[in-house]
Image (tube, rainbow, N blue to C red):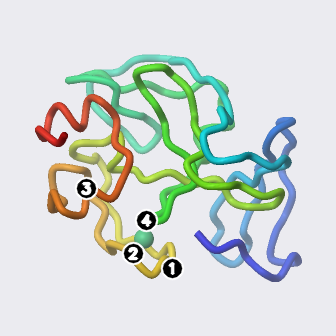
Amino acid sequence: MASPTASNDIEFLSNHNIVEIVLNKSTNQKLLRSLIRFNRGDIVATFSAKSVVDTPNYLTVQVDHNKHIELSPDFLQYTNHSCSPNVFYNTSTMQLIAIEEIKVGDEICFFYPSTEIDMAQPFICGCGSHCCLKEIKGAMHLDSEVLKKYKLSDFVRNQLSIQ
Ligand SMILES: [Zn+2]
């Protein structure tokens, strides 16, 4: 997702050492911005399950059949979706991994279908990427040729028989 250019559209909310939560006042959306630089392959954070639920909601990440976790640390819940993500939630190792170089000030985004088979709250994406998929509903709704371009969780790959 493109970072908002006008800084007066951005309101600082809180600092979490590696990232900050800010509010984009033009979209009224909270987002995570990196406070440090990451190379591709770096571990941005390790995460754990604050709670485990059997049905997905807008805060959860899918780790298995009927197993969806709320993320800890809490600030990770503000990781928005992008069709050109720069991080990946590895739900096997419970590590958030940089899959592109991340510069200071970049928004941290992941590809929701990389972990979600069938989302509770589908939405129309406005990430602005040249490869934006528009309708984001979960991995099972995407063409396998599209999915092959993305890093996907082991669970999603196994579910959809993607090599
Ligand atoms: Zn998009």
Callouts 3 and 1 close, C-beta under 8 Å: no
Q: Which residue is mark 2?
A: 132
Q: Is residue 56 above or below residue 101?
A: above
Amino acid type assigned to the residue bearing label 4 in the image: Cys
Q: Which one is earlier in the sequence, the residue at label 4 or at label 1?
A: 4
**Label 2 C-beta lies within 8 Å of the nearest ligand 1 atom:** yes
Q: Which residue is mark 4?
A: 83
**Label 3 C-beta lies within 8 Å of the nearest ligand 1 atom:** no
**Label 1 C-beta lies within 8 Å of the nearest ligand 1 atom:** yes
Q: Is residue 73 above or below residue 148?
A: above
Residue 97: quarter of image: top right
Callouts 2 and 4 close, C-beta under 8 Å: yes
Judge the density around disc 3: few (<14), some (14-19), many (≥20) Cα neighbours within 10 Å.
Answer: some
| Mark 3 element type | helix
Residue 28: x and y in percent read 65, 68
**CA separation in Å, label 3 and label 2:** 13 Å
**CA separation in Å, label 3 and label 1:** 19 Å
Q: Which one is earlier in the sequence, the residue at label 3 or at label 4?
A: 4
Instruction: Give the quadrant of the N terminus.
Output: bottom right
Mark drawn on residue 128: 1
Judge the density around disc 1: few (<14), some (14-19), many (≥20) Cα neighbours within 10 Å.
Answer: some
Which is closer to the viewer, label 3 or label 4? 3
Q: Which one is earlier in the sequence, the residue at label 2 or at label 4?
A: 4
**CA separation in Å, label 2 and label 1:** 6 Å
Residue 76: x and y in percent read 62, 37
Amino acid type assigned to the residue bearing label 3 in the image: Leu
Q: Which residue is mark 3?
A: 147
